[in-house]
Image (cartoon, rainbow, N blue to C red):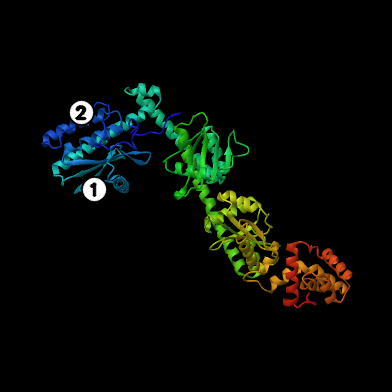
Amino acid sequence: MAGSRAYSPYHRYPDRKGGLPRGSAGWRPTAAPRRPRLPARTPAAHALLELIALSSAQFDAPDEGEILRLAMDHVVAAGPYSAEAGYLKVGGDLVPSPWNGRTHAVTVGRRVRELAGQDGNVTVAGRPWGRALGLRGPGVLHGYLVVTSRSRPTKAERSLLSMLVRHTAAALSLAFAHRRQGEDALELRRLREERTALQRKLISVTAELGYERALHALMADVAASGGGEEAVTRALHGLTGLPALVEDRFGRLRSWTGPGRPVPYPEPDPVRQKDMLRAVAKEAGPVRIRDRLLTLVRPHGEILGVLALVDTRDEADEHTVLALGHAATSLALELTHLRNLAEVELRLHRELADDLLAGTDGPSAYARSEAVGHDLHGSHYIVVVQWSNRTADDAFAQTVGRAAVAVGMRSLLTHRTDHVVLITGDRPHARALYEALARENGTRSGTIGVSAPCDSVDDIPHHYQEAQRALDVRRHSRERYGTSFFDELGLYRILGPGSGRRELETFVQEWLGQLIDYDSRHHATMVETLSRYFDCGGNYDETADSLTIHRSTLRYRLQRIREISGHDLANVEDRLNLQVATRVWKIVLGGPGHG
């Protein structure tokens, strides 16, 4: 019914979860009229009469909770019994009675759920005999009555207990039937004692079954069409008339059908989203949060998304809830299929990325990359990512992959023990990937290292080392969080473990390449002049004497060196890198004549 609340068998007793257990200090019986408590020990005939009187009281009880309470209070009439706990089945779950004892609540509750609808023994400390007895109606389980005894019951006492259980189950069946009748339309409730009421109810049930069959057929068509989230939201909007939407588990909109879509869609708060998912996951069915009726899409227990209806006027009825549940089931199948495809694609990408980082032959790599839809031709960059609050596992790798897609990076992805690796065809923006990951992870405490451009598949392992060097340099710098590029490290490119002749040559070429080319073309000695200048500590007179040139000639050469190289000798960073480059050029690479 529109605006109705979720059913609870204990709605007359608001302390169902936190109420005092029966018999504890401060406990008070309900105000409803009830028969006085029966004595614990009676002859068999007297006990039988009392059970008959109890049965009459149960059939007159106003609801299922009161029926169960009467059975728990008067189980002593059947023998040396104590009622440890009672449960009513609501919405597929066994809801404990507020009169259950607290001492064994967890153990008994777990055991009852393990029985899965069957009767079974229950172990309670200090009680040699215990039994969980199903309260069954025609083809349905209404709940459980958990009974213990100070001694093993006799055959007669067991027979009396069985009678109490059957009468309680019959009273529950009637109460459930009355409750269902009470949920029907007002004219059906007024005429429930007459034949017309039964006929109208049959019509109502037939219509509901027809609606359910139509709903099944529609959702089956949606699943068969392969239309994904949009097909589900279109069908759900058509059935309910309410705007329908799908969000991923992070709160980002995937599909919306119906009016009123916010533009732009609100950016989710990670903390609030986790709290909301946790709250909805605790409930058995759809949950209302403000103006939305939500249900989780979670096949096999894993949350893949959220399906919701926007119900600003509180119009949702049982048909709406039924449609939402069926739509969630259909969507779960679709998302599971898409998830499986994504996992296969991710595995193929990861295997290729692992082989590229370890070193593999070019023709095989190009063929495999084409098969997974990634173009390995052209320049590539190796990107390594670490985040302080994330372990480098599959979940973090997927987070990095989403962020890379969000900023437009075409990538192969894998992960190592402490970092995630991207092989991307685009040079990452200095801040875009970092900012996207900071939003995903809720913290800015992350570091990204980027290699120099790689033009050959064979060079990928070497450039992977460059990316790691860039990340390490950043992590040990004053500003440890952010993005560092290997080709912007300057002197740090040749410092630290793993530096080889290739890094030295690249470093010298970057800082002295223009001067070396100039000397080669013009048979000049610009690099030697710069080297001698540094060797003399920047002293003009000593440098000019060592080169056997005039001081003005030296000044002219130094000016030309600035113009040709594009580096400023007055800049501390440029001066340091140039000095180191001249030392490497002269001592390691052989000085004049080195190309």
Residue 524, image x and y in percent?
A: 86, 73
Residue lying at 15% horizontally and 32% vertically, measured from the top left? 49
What count of labels does the image hold? 2
Q: Is residue 216 visible?
A: no
| Cα gap from disc 2 to disc 1, whole angstroms | 29 Å
**Element carrying mark 2:** loop
Name the residue type under label 2: Arg
Give the number of the disc on residue 486: none
Image quadrant where residue 254 sits: top right
Can you see residue 400? yes
Toward the viewer: 308 or 388?
388
Quadrant showing the N terminus: top left
Rendered position, 467 above or below 233: below
* 582 vs 295: above or below: below
Q: Give the residue displayed 17% in from the left and 45% down from the top.
A: 150
The quarter of the rendered structure image containing the C terminus is: bottom right
Residue nearest the observer in this picture, 232 or 248: 248
Provide the secondary structure element on which disc 1 rests: loop
Q: Which residue is mark 2?
A: 35
Instruction: Identify the residue at image location x=30%, y=30%.
Output: 63
Residue type, numbered disc 1:
Val
Answer with left or right where residue 547 lies relative to residue 8: right
Tell me if 586 is positioned left or right of 123 in this view: right
Which tag, 2 or 1, sits closer to the chain's start? 2
Place of residue 282 in the rendered image (x, y in percent of width and height, measured from the top left) = 42, 43
The answer to whether marks 2 and 1 mark residues whose Cβ atoms lie closer than 8 Å is no
- Residue 443 image position (x, y, % from top left): 56, 50
Graded by Cα atoms within 10 Å as few (under 14), some (14 to 19) or many (20 or more), the crowding at tag 1 reads: some
Q: Where residue 359 appears, x then y in whole percent?
A: 62, 70
Horizontal placement of 366 versus 591: left or right?
Answer: left
Task: Identify which residue, 371 or 500, lies in the foreground.
Answer: 500
